[in-house]
Amino acid sequence: MQILQNGRFAVSTWSLHRLLGAIYAYSPDPDKSAAPKEPYGPGAAALIDMPAALAARGIHRLEVCSFHLPSLEASYIGELRDAMAASNVLLQTLLVEDGDPSHPETAERDVRWMAEWIDIATALGAQKMRVIAGKQKPTEENLSRAARHLGWLGEQAEGSGVRVVVENWFDLLPSPVEMNWLLDRLDGKVGLNGDLGNWAAPAKYEGLADIMRRAEICHAKADYGVAGLDADDYRKCLEMCGRASYAGPFTLIYDSAFFPDEWDGILLQKAFIEDFLREAPTRLTA
């Protein structure tokens, strides 16, 4: 059995967006400002403290949303990398949260902006950089445009040590048909971050069983209702990962107000996956 470096679990800073507070909406659109905003409140912790907070909870992988970086200056990037090293936390993925490679008017501008993040991801020590594949409707023209620009982006990352990945997300990729078409056209230049929560049930289960065979990482998002975590849905999603022989890490995505303390939701999801693995150790084996 292969043991994944730094364990099987990661946490995205999105799962801690209320704790972190301010966001910085970096964008290729010159009319948008990256000045800090507080749509989720003022926050109570700083990003640079998250590696130690993760390590204290036995988690040693982190994903950072681009809008959670309070500065892109080399000095801050170096401090954040040092904080991760001090806590033995691996930066699994830098999540670039804007841009649209499928847009008929701004795709080239957006993908060139995305390419600028490769150097930032490299400086942070990130293994991967997740970008948005596209937000337009999945017409042949829009899919082809996205494939062309994403292929170029993947080529720009060659030799950097950073692997570009996309996600089954937004209108361009509503099903495995479009997802597989895009990955086939990219011919290995760009990988897949499979997300368990972006497609709607019940169709998503067979869809996940299809695409997770190609996934390198996984956003293990759980749904919540008035009674708490939707255990049936989460279990089915994990079963589909098993059917696909997915053996990579799980990024714990907590996106609910059910628990006032976001760590409670994150650790509940971690325990759920751990219990699932113990119940059937041959499933999801790394």
Image (cartoon, rainbow, N blue to C red):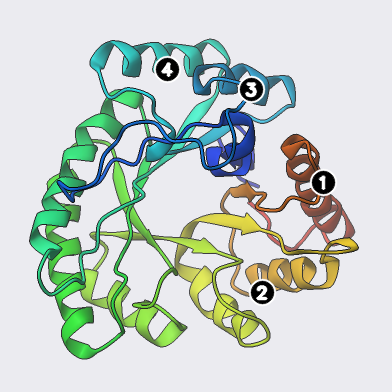
Q: Residue at x 67, y 49 (%)?
A: 254
Q: Is residue 172 above or below residue 98?
A: below
Amino acid type assigned to the residue bearing label 1 in the image: Leu
Q: Tell me how far mark 3 sits from mark 4, CA to CA.
A: 18 Å
User: Left or right: 188 with respect to 57?
Assistant: left
Q: Are marks 3 and 1 in contact (CB under 8 Å)?
A: no
Q: Which mark is residue 44?
A: 3
Q: Residue at x 56, y 55 (%)?
A: 219
Question: Which callout, 4 or 1, points at the residue further toward the start of the chain?
Answer: 4
Horizontal and vertical percent for residue 81? 40, 18
**Residue, disc 2:** 240
Question: Which callout, 2 or 4, points at the residue further toward the start of the chain?
Answer: 4
Q: Tell me how far mark 2 sits from mark 4, CA to CA.
A: 35 Å
Q: Residues within 10 Å of mark 4 (few under 14, many from 20)?
A: many
Q: Which mark is residue 268?
A: 1
Q: Are marks 2 and 4 in contact (CB under 8 Å)?
A: no
**Residue, disc 4:** 80
Q: Is residue 41 above or below residue 101?
A: above
Q: Tell me how far mark 2 sits from mark 3, CA to CA.
A: 37 Å
Question: Which callout, 3 or 4, points at the residue further toward the start of the chain?
Answer: 3
Foreground mark, 3 or 4, reads 3
User: Left or right: 29 with respect to 133?
Assistant: left
Q: Tell me how far mark 2 sits from mark 1, CA to CA.
A: 20 Å
Foreground mark, 2 or 3, reads 3
In the image, 246 versus 230, the foreground residue is 230
In the image, 260 versus 125, the foreground residue is 260
In the image, 200 versus 7, the foreground residue is 200
Question: Which callout, 2 or 3, points at the residue further toward the start of the chain?
Answer: 3
Foreground mark, 2 or 4, reads 4
